[in-house]
Image: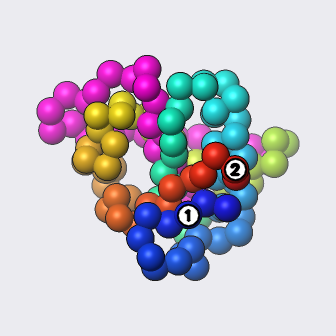
Amino acid sequence: MPRNVTESGESHLSEEILSTASLLRKEAVESEPAILRAYLFPAPDEVRLIHVDSTIAPLPAGESIAPFHFGAAPEYGIRLRSAVALIAPEDDRSAPLPDGWGTWESATIMSDHD
């Protein structure tokens, strides 16, 4: 299971969000082995992931992370919409987050064993 960046626990994430995030992370790592880690941001009805990818160029100064948005895909076991972004290691935990995503401290780190 994912582990929280803070000590506040995982109660803010539903089982469906956690399982969907794990599935999306697994698929991403299988298709892009340069992904070093992933962060899951709390949301009530959407999976919000940021993948740290060693092949991505850093963001220009002051630019916020811009996620790609995807609809639900029930035929693949994904019943929630998702928003996924790729960032460079240099931007890890420092780049400005998308509006409404909270803070880096509110994120959950997805482990390699999800």
Q: Quadrant of residue 12?
A: bottom right
* Residue 48 sits inside the magenta stretch: yes
Q: Which residue is mark 2?
A: 113
- For image coordinates 50% across by 66% down, the residue present is 4
What is the span of residues highlighted in magenta in the rendered image?
A: 46-74
Specify the farthest residue to the left: 61
Give residue 26's position: percent from left, percent from top. Answer: 70, 40
Give the residue type at disc 1: Arg
Q: Earlier in the sequence, mark 1 or mark 2?
A: 1
**In this picture, is 44 found above or below 112?**
below
Apparent side of residue 93 relative to residue 25 in the rendered image (left or right): left
Give residue 65's position: percent from left, percent from top. Answer: 33, 40
- For image coordinates 32% across by 49% down, the residue present is 93
Residue 71 appearing in the image: no
Give residue 106's position: percent from left, percent from top. Answer: 40, 66
Q: Which residue is mark 1?
A: 3
**In this picture, is 56 found above or below 107?**
above
* Residue 40 sits inside the magenta stretch: no
- For image coordinates 48% across by 51% down, the residue present is 39
